[in-house]
Structures are given as structure tokens and as C-alpha cells.
Image: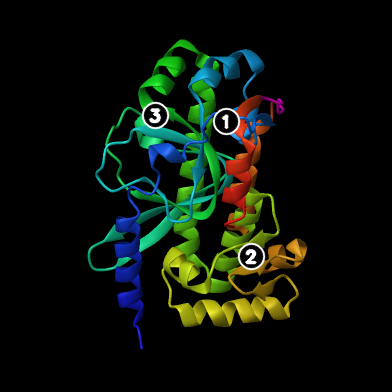
Amino acid sequence: METFESRLRRWDRNVSEARHGIAPDRALSSTNREQTVSVQNRLLAGLAPPSFERLRPFLEPIALKRHAVLQDYHYPIEYIYFIERGVASILMRTQHDGPVEISMVGRLGFVGVAAVLGIQRSPNRCLMLVPGYGLRIAVSDLQRIAQRCPDVQQQLFNYIHALLVQNAQTNLCSARHGLEERLSRWLLLAVDRLDDHIIPVTHDMLSVILGVRRASITTTLAELEQTGGLVRQRGGINVCDRAALERRTCECYRIIASEYGYLNRGGLHQHCISADIGLIRSCLCCI
């Protein structure tokens, strides 16, 4: 039987092989199927139209496959990714213990915080846990625009603050709360970032994310299913009763969700961008 440690090594090996999973030809190319779509990323939607227009020429729609590596340990950060659809997992590791998730990124934020702060080398690995698509921009272009547009820079900093709160609260949660509360928190945060009640994640993935054994995940999910909060499906979890799941989680979820709520207190704007609809649809079919 495969041990937990061997699964961690296999996970790490598979991810390393996917480091170049985002090839240039996977960008949503300009074709006769190109149409205008609304921007889904809440951080971009929170920008006033003049500020977004500064970014628009440099934003490149791109398909993001499952396990695509957006940044990796000690590698240079070339692009910032604003997630439009899907969930990316930010992982830290030691050589002995393997990877554990420290935070997740979805349509509420972006990948590449270190580069925004002027650090060109990634301290962690970020991979797509739930496939989707996003808008990427070269680090140099975003830095130049942020320096010239205080609104863009402040919006980026607002998100970094929310992410720091999320990371700190996750650390507290991991140290003080039980697996049922931690797992419920993770599922609720994933629902918020996907804007969907179905989360296409396996028990094996959750065991790596939360740093526990797969059997513990299976047992806890079964207990949560009995409360009516979720239904286990093949290759995914259906959060059918959000209120029931919120009753099983801890205060940590509400603290994190509240902090992200401040990001859009100024309201949302409808921005549009050209994208290859066919490629977006084919990517979402992988979910």
C-alpha cells in the first residue's frame, strides 16, 4: 500500500514535471472565435475604468490546466496571474515533510505577490488545483503601471494585506482547530473563489493541502456529509448546504472572508476584454 510520504513524493514529482505546463501557444490566441468577455477577477473589477484601461493592453488571457505551475520554488517570476476562473494553491515545503498549502488564490486575487513587492525570485510553488483561465501580465509591465497609477498600486497592496491576514489566520487555525473545522473552512473559501458549489477536488489532493492522511479526510468528509452540508461525488465535493457547513467551521473562515470583503467596498465595475471563447470553454470542460 502506498504510504502518505510516498504520495507526497509522487505529488511533488508530478508537479515538477508540469513546471512548463503553460506553453506560449496555450495563450488564448486571436482567432475568428475571439469575442469580448466580462472580466471576472474581483480585484480587476474593483478598479475604476481609467485605471483598468492602463492595464488592458498588457493583459493576456491564458488557459490554466490542472497542475499547471504558475511559479516555483526559487525560480524567477515572469508573470502576474489574475485568476478569472479556477483555484490556484500556494504551497510551501521541506525536503522531509513535502508540500502543504499556505493559501489559495481564485478570482478574488492574483498570483505573484513577491514580484509586486520587488522580489524577483519565488519563495514558494503555486499550481492550479482547479483548472480554469486567467489574465496574465509581465511583471515589468505591471510594475511600470503601478508606479504611474496609484489606484492600481493601492489595489494590489490591498490584496496583499488580505492575503497576509489569510495566511496568519490559516496558521492559527492549523495550530488550534480540529480537522472538521479546518476542512470546512477550506471548502467554504474554495466556494467563494469559484463562485460555484461544486469543488472538483479529490481526497488525495485535500490530504496534501491540509497536511493530513487521506483516511482522515475521507472520515471527516463522511461526518460532514451526515450533517447535510455536502455530498461527496466522484472526483469532487458538492457543497449543497452552505449554512450547514458554516455551522461546522470555526471563526477563522468569517475573519478571512470579512477581510476579503473590504477589497470591493468601493463597488465593482464591468470591464471587458477580448478572448478566444472556444479555448475558454474547452478549458472549463476539464473541471
Query: Start and end of the magenta stretch?
Result: 267-271
- Report x, y in % for residue 178: 53, 72
Query: Mark 3, mark 1: which one is toward the viewer?
Result: 1
User: What residue lies at 36% left-to-right and 66% top-to-bottom?
Assistant: 11
Q: Which residue is mark 3?
A: 116
* Secondary structure type for disc 2: loop
Amino acid on which disc 3 is placed: Val
Q: Earlier in the sequence, mark 2 or mark 3?
A: 3
Name the kind of residue labelled 1 in the image. Thr
Front in this rendered view, residue 231 or 276: 276
Residue occupied by mark 2:
249
Report x, y in % for residue 250.
Answer: 61, 63
Residue 280 covered by magenta stretch: no
Does 90 sit left or right of 196 as displayed? left
What's the amino acid at mark 2? Thr
Which residue position is annotated with label 1? 31
